[in-house]
Amino acid sequence: MSLKVAYIPEHFSTPLFLAEKHGYYKEKNLSIEFIPVPEGSGKLIKLLNSKEVDLAIGLTEAFIAEIGKGNDDLKLLDTYVNSPLLWSVSTGNNRNELTNLQDLKNHKAVGISRIGSGSYVMSFVLAHSIGLDKFEDFKVCSTFKNLRDSVNLIKSSEFENSDFFMWEFFTSKKYYDNKEIKKIGEIYTPWPSWIIVGNSTSVIEKKQDISNFISCINRGIKYFNDHLDESIEYIANNLDYSTEDAQNWTKTVEFNNKIGEVPLDWDKIVTNTTKVLKEAGVLKDDDSEIEERLDSNIYKTNI
Protein backbone atom coordinates (compact mmCIF):
# COMPACT_ATOMS: atom_id res chain seq x y z
CA MET A 1 0.00 0.00 0.00
CA SER A 2 1.35 3.43 -0.93
CA LEU A 3 0.88 6.83 0.65
CA LYS A 4 0.11 9.77 -1.62
CA VAL A 5 1.53 12.97 -0.15
CA ALA A 6 0.77 16.38 -1.67
CA TYR A 7 3.25 19.18 -1.06
CA ILE A 8 4.13 22.65 -2.32
CA PRO A 9 7.44 22.48 -4.23
CA GLU A 10 9.28 25.10 -2.22
CA HIS A 11 12.30 25.00 0.10
CA PHE A 12 10.16 23.79 3.02
CA SER A 13 9.79 20.41 1.31
CA THR A 14 13.51 19.61 1.56
CA PRO A 15 13.40 17.23 4.59
CA LEU A 16 10.80 15.08 2.81
CA PHE A 17 13.21 14.38 -0.02
CA LEU A 18 16.30 14.03 2.11
CA ALA A 19 14.39 11.24 3.87
CA GLU A 20 13.72 9.66 0.48
CA LYS A 21 17.30 10.12 -0.73
CA HIS A 22 18.74 8.41 2.33
CA GLY A 23 16.36 5.46 2.29
CA TYR A 24 14.31 6.18 5.40
CA TYR A 25 11.00 5.28 3.72
CA LYS A 26 12.40 2.02 2.37
CA GLU A 27 13.56 1.04 5.83
CA LYS A 28 9.92 1.23 6.94
CA ASN A 29 8.69 -0.57 3.79
CA LEU A 30 6.84 2.55 2.73
CA SER A 31 5.95 3.41 -0.85
CA ILE A 32 5.54 7.20 -1.02
CA GLU A 33 4.14 9.02 -4.04
CA PHE A 34 4.88 12.72 -3.74
CA ILE A 35 2.50 14.98 -5.66
CA PRO A 36 3.74 18.54 -6.26
CA VAL A 37 1.06 21.23 -5.98
CA PRO A 38 2.47 24.62 -7.03
CA GLU A 39 -1.07 26.09 -6.97
CA GLY A 40 -0.99 26.22 -3.16
CA SER A 41 -3.18 25.28 -0.22
CA GLY A 42 -6.52 25.59 -2.01
CA LYS A 43 -5.54 22.80 -4.38
CA LEU A 44 -4.18 20.74 -1.46
CA ILE A 45 -7.60 20.92 0.19
CA LYS A 46 -9.35 19.82 -3.01
CA LEU A 47 -7.06 16.80 -3.33
CA LEU A 48 -7.72 15.78 0.28
CA ASN A 49 -11.48 16.25 -0.11
CA SER A 50 -11.56 14.03 -3.20
CA LYS A 51 -9.37 11.40 -1.48
CA GLU A 52 -6.83 11.72 -4.30
CA VAL A 53 -4.12 12.10 -1.67
CA ASP A 54 -3.72 10.73 1.84
CA LEU A 55 -1.72 13.58 3.34
CA ALA A 56 -0.91 17.19 2.51
CA ILE A 57 1.56 19.69 3.93
CA GLY A 58 0.49 23.31 3.66
CA LEU A 59 -0.08 26.66 5.33
CA THR A 60 -1.61 26.61 8.78
CA GLU A 61 -4.22 29.31 8.19
CA ALA A 62 -5.66 27.65 5.09
CA PHE A 63 -6.38 24.35 6.83
CA ILE A 64 -7.59 25.87 10.11
CA ALA A 65 -10.03 27.96 8.04
CA GLU A 66 -11.32 24.94 6.15
CA ILE A 67 -11.83 22.83 9.28
CA GLY A 68 -13.39 25.78 11.09
CA LYS A 69 -15.92 26.16 8.27
CA GLY A 70 -17.05 22.57 8.85
CA ASN A 71 -14.98 20.34 6.56
CA ASP A 72 -14.98 16.99 8.40
CA ASP A 73 -12.90 15.35 5.64
CA LEU A 74 -9.75 17.02 6.96
CA LYS A 75 -7.86 15.88 10.06
CA LEU A 76 -5.02 18.09 11.26
CA LEU A 77 -2.24 15.84 12.54
CA ASP A 78 0.58 18.12 13.69
CA THR A 79 2.87 21.06 13.05
CA TYR A 80 5.51 20.63 10.32
CA VAL A 81 7.31 23.99 10.73
CA ASN A 82 7.43 25.70 14.13
CA SER A 83 8.78 29.03 12.91
CA PRO A 84 6.41 31.68 11.53
CA LEU A 85 6.30 32.43 7.82
CA LEU A 86 7.94 35.65 6.67
CA TRP A 87 5.56 37.33 4.24
CA SER A 88 7.09 39.93 1.98
CA VAL A 89 4.96 42.87 0.78
CA SER A 90 5.64 43.58 -2.88
CA THR A 91 4.63 46.00 -5.60
CA GLY A 92 5.70 46.69 -9.18
CA ASN A 93 9.31 47.71 -9.60
CA ASN A 94 8.33 51.00 -11.26
CA ARG A 95 5.52 51.92 -8.85
CA ASN A 96 7.27 55.03 -7.53
CA GLU A 97 4.21 56.05 -5.52
CA LEU A 98 4.72 53.01 -3.28
CA THR A 99 7.93 52.88 -1.26
CA ASN A 100 6.89 51.70 2.22
CA LEU A 101 4.02 50.13 4.14
CA GLN A 102 2.54 53.47 5.22
CA ASP A 103 1.94 54.31 1.55
CA LEU A 104 -0.63 51.49 1.49
CA LYS A 105 -3.03 53.68 3.45
CA ASN A 106 -3.65 55.50 0.17
CA HIS A 107 -3.23 52.55 -2.20
CA LYS A 108 -5.44 49.74 -0.94
CA ALA A 109 -6.00 47.32 -3.84
CA VAL A 110 -4.64 44.00 -2.54
CA GLY A 111 -3.61 41.23 -4.93
CA ILE A 112 -4.46 37.80 -3.49
CA SER A 113 -4.39 34.23 -4.78
CA ARG A 114 -7.97 33.57 -3.60
CA ILE A 115 -10.42 34.67 -0.92
CA GLY A 116 -9.46 32.89 2.30
CA SER A 117 -5.87 32.17 1.23
CA GLY A 118 -2.81 33.06 3.26
CA SER A 119 -2.23 36.12 1.07
CA TYR A 120 -5.80 37.21 1.90
CA VAL A 121 -5.74 36.44 5.62
CA MET A 122 -2.36 38.08 6.20
CA SER A 123 -3.61 41.33 4.68
CA PHE A 124 -5.72 41.75 7.84
CA VAL A 125 -2.65 41.29 10.03
CA LEU A 126 -0.80 43.81 7.86
CA ALA A 127 -3.66 46.33 8.01
CA HIS A 128 -3.64 46.28 11.82
CA SER A 129 0.14 46.73 11.86
CA ILE A 130 -0.08 50.01 9.92
CA GLY A 131 -3.09 51.39 11.77
CA LEU A 132 -5.93 50.39 9.45
CA ASP A 133 -9.01 48.38 10.36
CA LYS A 134 -8.71 46.30 7.19
CA PHE A 135 -8.19 46.40 3.45
CA GLU A 136 -11.40 45.90 1.47
CA ASP A 137 -10.41 46.00 -2.22
CA PHE A 138 -9.23 42.50 -3.17
CA LYS A 139 -8.09 41.46 -6.64
CA VAL A 140 -8.09 37.67 -7.09
CA CYS A 141 -5.11 36.67 -9.23
CA SER A 142 -4.82 32.89 -8.57
CA THR A 143 -1.09 32.45 -9.23
CA PHE A 144 2.18 34.02 -8.14
CA LYS A 145 2.92 34.99 -11.75
CA ASN A 146 -0.44 36.75 -12.09
CA LEU A 147 0.19 38.60 -8.83
CA ARG A 148 3.50 39.92 -10.14
CA ASP A 149 1.86 40.99 -13.39
CA SER A 150 -1.01 42.59 -11.48
CA VAL A 151 1.20 45.00 -9.51
CA ASN A 152 3.11 45.78 -12.69
CA LEU A 153 -0.21 46.92 -14.21
CA ILE A 154 -0.10 44.39 -17.04
CA LYS A 155 -3.53 44.06 -18.65
CA SER A 156 -5.11 40.62 -18.67
CA SER A 157 -8.54 39.01 -18.82
CA GLU A 158 -7.46 36.67 -15.98
CA PHE A 159 -7.05 39.28 -13.23
CA GLU A 160 -7.37 42.95 -12.29
CA ASN A 161 -4.47 45.23 -11.45
CA SER A 162 -3.53 45.72 -7.80
CA ASP A 163 -1.26 47.92 -5.70
CA PHE A 164 0.53 45.25 -3.69
CA PHE A 165 0.51 41.58 -2.72
CA MET A 166 2.05 39.36 -0.05
CA TRP A 167 4.10 36.20 -0.63
CA GLU A 168 6.81 34.24 1.18
CA PHE A 169 10.01 36.30 1.21
CA PHE A 170 12.58 33.86 -0.14
CA THR A 171 10.27 32.77 -2.97
CA SER A 172 9.81 36.46 -3.85
CA LYS A 173 13.48 37.42 -3.60
CA LYS A 174 14.46 36.10 -7.03
CA TYR A 175 12.04 38.62 -8.53
CA TYR A 176 13.47 41.46 -6.47
CA ASP A 177 16.90 40.57 -7.76
CA ASN A 178 15.78 40.63 -11.40
CA LYS A 179 13.87 43.92 -10.84
CA GLU A 180 10.45 42.50 -11.75
CA ILE A 181 8.96 43.56 -8.41
CA LYS A 182 10.20 45.47 -5.38
CA LYS A 183 9.83 44.91 -1.66
CA ILE A 184 8.16 47.61 0.43
CA GLY A 185 7.90 45.74 3.71
CA GLU A 186 7.53 42.43 5.50
CA ILE A 187 5.51 40.80 8.27
CA TYR A 188 5.54 37.46 10.12
CA THR A 189 2.56 35.20 10.73
CA PRO A 190 1.42 35.19 14.37
CA TRP A 191 1.46 31.35 14.25
CA PRO A 192 3.70 28.43 13.23
CA SER A 193 3.61 28.31 9.47
CA TRP A 194 3.15 24.77 8.11
CA ILE A 195 1.08 21.78 9.24
CA ILE A 196 0.40 18.17 8.18
CA VAL A 197 -3.19 17.22 7.36
CA GLY A 198 -4.75 13.90 6.36
CA ASN A 199 -8.08 12.99 4.83
CA SER A 200 -10.56 11.41 7.23
CA THR A 201 -10.45 7.96 5.59
CA SER A 202 -6.69 7.63 5.33
CA VAL A 203 -5.95 8.58 8.94
CA ILE A 204 -7.98 5.50 9.95
CA GLU A 205 -7.21 3.00 7.19
CA LYS A 206 -3.53 3.89 6.84
CA LYS A 207 -2.78 4.82 10.43
CA GLN A 208 0.39 2.71 10.75
CA ASP A 209 1.79 3.85 7.42
CA ILE A 210 1.16 7.46 8.37
CA SER A 211 2.85 6.95 11.73
CA ASN A 212 5.86 5.40 9.99
CA PHE A 213 5.95 8.21 7.43
CA ILE A 214 5.98 10.82 10.19
CA SER A 215 8.84 9.06 11.96
CA CYS A 216 10.75 9.24 8.66
CA ILE A 217 10.04 12.96 8.34
CA ASN A 218 11.49 13.48 11.82
CA ARG A 219 14.64 11.70 10.66
CA GLY A 220 14.66 13.81 7.49
CA ILE A 221 14.43 16.97 9.58
CA LYS A 222 17.28 15.81 11.79
CA TYR A 223 19.35 15.08 8.70
CA PHE A 224 18.48 18.53 7.31
CA ASN A 225 19.68 20.21 10.52
CA ASP A 226 22.82 18.08 10.83
CA HIS A 227 23.88 18.42 7.18
CA LEU A 228 23.05 22.00 6.22
CA ASP A 229 25.55 22.09 3.36
CA GLU A 230 23.80 19.15 1.67
CA SER A 231 20.39 20.68 2.40
CA ILE A 232 21.41 23.98 0.84
CA GLU A 233 22.84 22.19 -2.18
CA TYR A 234 19.57 20.28 -2.65
CA ILE A 235 17.52 23.51 -2.52
CA ALA A 236 19.80 25.33 -4.96
CA ASN A 237 19.86 22.42 -7.42
CA ASN A 238 16.22 21.39 -7.29
CA LEU A 239 14.00 24.24 -6.15
CA ASP A 240 15.03 27.34 -8.12
CA TYR A 241 16.67 29.26 -5.29
CA SER A 242 20.19 30.65 -5.31
CA THR A 243 22.73 29.09 -2.96
CA GLU A 244 22.95 32.36 -1.04
CA ASP A 245 19.17 32.60 -0.61
CA ALA A 246 18.95 28.96 0.46
CA GLN A 247 21.74 29.57 2.96
CA ASN A 248 19.99 32.60 4.44
CA TRP A 249 16.66 30.80 4.61
CA THR A 250 18.11 27.93 6.65
CA LYS A 251 19.01 30.48 9.34
CA THR A 252 15.34 31.45 9.72
CA VAL A 253 13.47 28.13 9.61
CA GLU A 254 12.73 25.84 12.54
CA PHE A 255 11.17 22.50 11.62
CA ASN A 256 9.24 20.51 14.19
CA ASN A 257 11.60 17.60 14.89
CA LYS A 258 9.12 15.86 17.21
CA ILE A 259 6.15 15.49 14.87
CA GLY A 260 3.59 13.17 16.43
CA GLU A 261 5.57 12.80 19.63
CA VAL A 262 4.17 15.64 21.75
CA PRO A 263 0.70 17.20 21.85
CA LEU A 264 -0.09 19.98 19.39
CA ASP A 265 0.40 23.52 20.71
CA TRP A 266 -3.29 24.44 20.67
CA ASP A 267 -2.89 28.12 21.54
CA LYS A 268 -0.29 28.84 18.86
CA ILE A 269 -1.79 26.76 16.08
CA VAL A 270 -5.53 27.00 16.69
CA THR A 271 -6.39 29.92 18.99
CA ASN A 272 -4.10 32.52 17.37
CA THR A 273 -5.01 31.52 13.83
CA THR A 274 -8.75 31.33 14.49
CA LYS A 275 -8.77 34.82 15.98
CA VAL A 276 -7.36 36.35 12.77
CA LEU A 277 -9.60 34.21 10.55
CA LYS A 278 -12.63 35.57 12.40
CA GLU A 279 -11.40 39.14 12.00
CA ALA A 280 -10.90 38.48 8.30
CA GLY A 281 -14.45 37.20 7.93
CA VAL A 282 -13.20 33.81 6.75
CA LEU A 283 -14.91 32.15 9.73
CA LYS A 284 -18.39 33.54 10.29
CA ASP A 285 -20.31 31.02 12.40
CA ASP A 286 -20.85 31.15 16.15
CA ASP A 287 -17.68 30.78 18.20
CA SER A 288 -18.98 27.65 19.92
CA GLU A 289 -19.74 25.98 16.58
CA ILE A 290 -16.32 26.80 15.17
CA GLU A 291 -14.58 25.57 18.33
CA GLU A 292 -16.54 22.31 18.26
CA ARG A 293 -15.46 21.63 14.66
CA LEU A 294 -11.83 22.35 15.44
CA ASP A 295 -11.95 20.26 18.59
CA SER A 296 -13.35 17.29 16.64
CA ASN A 297 -10.93 17.39 13.74
CA ILE A 298 -7.56 18.33 15.20
CA TYR A 299 -5.38 15.81 17.00
CA LYS A 300 -4.55 16.97 20.51
CA THR A 301 -2.63 13.82 21.45
CA ASN A 302 0.30 11.98 19.95
CA ILE A 303 -0.23 10.41 16.54
Image (tube, grey):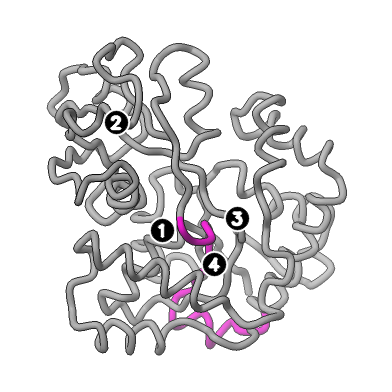
Judging by the rendered image, the residue that carries numbered circle 2 is: 102
| Vertical arrangement, residue 13 with respect to residue 67, above or below | above
Q: CA distance from mark 4 to mark 2?
A: 35 Å
The disc labelled 1 sits on which kind of residue?
Leu
Q: Secondary structure at mark 2?
A: helix
- Residue at x 72%, y 75% (from the top left corner): 212
Q: Are marks 2 and 1 in contact (CB under 8 Å)?
A: no
In front: mark 1 or mark 4? 4
Q: Amino acid at mark 2?
A: Gln
Return the disc, 2 or 1, that comes first in the chain's sequence: 1
Residue toward you, 230 or 184: 184
Relative to residue 236, is residue 111 drawn left or right? left
Rendering quarter of residue 89: top left
Q: Secondary structure at mark 1?
A: helix
**Residues under numbered marks 1 and 4 in contact, where contact means CB atoms less than 8 Å apart:** no
The residue where tag 4 is placed is 196
- Badge 2 crowding class, 10 Å Cα cut-off, few under 14, some 14 to 19, many 20 or more, is some
Residue at the farthest front position: 131
Q: Residue at x 54, y 53 (%)?
A: 84
Q: Which of labels 4 and 3 is toward the front?
A: 3
Q: Answer yes or no: do the residues labelled 4 and 2 have beta carbons within 8 Å?
A: no
Residue linked to disc 1: 44
- Quadrant location of the C terminus in the rendered image: bottom right
> Where does the magenta region start and end?
190-209
Q: How far apart are labels 2 and 1 at the CA level?
A: 34 Å
The amino acid pointed to by label 4 is: Ile
Distance Cα–Cα, label 4 vs label 3: 15 Å
Disc 3: which residue:
83
The dot on residue 230 is none
Image quadrant where residue 100 sits:
top left
Where does residue 231 sit, x and y in percent of width and height? 77, 41
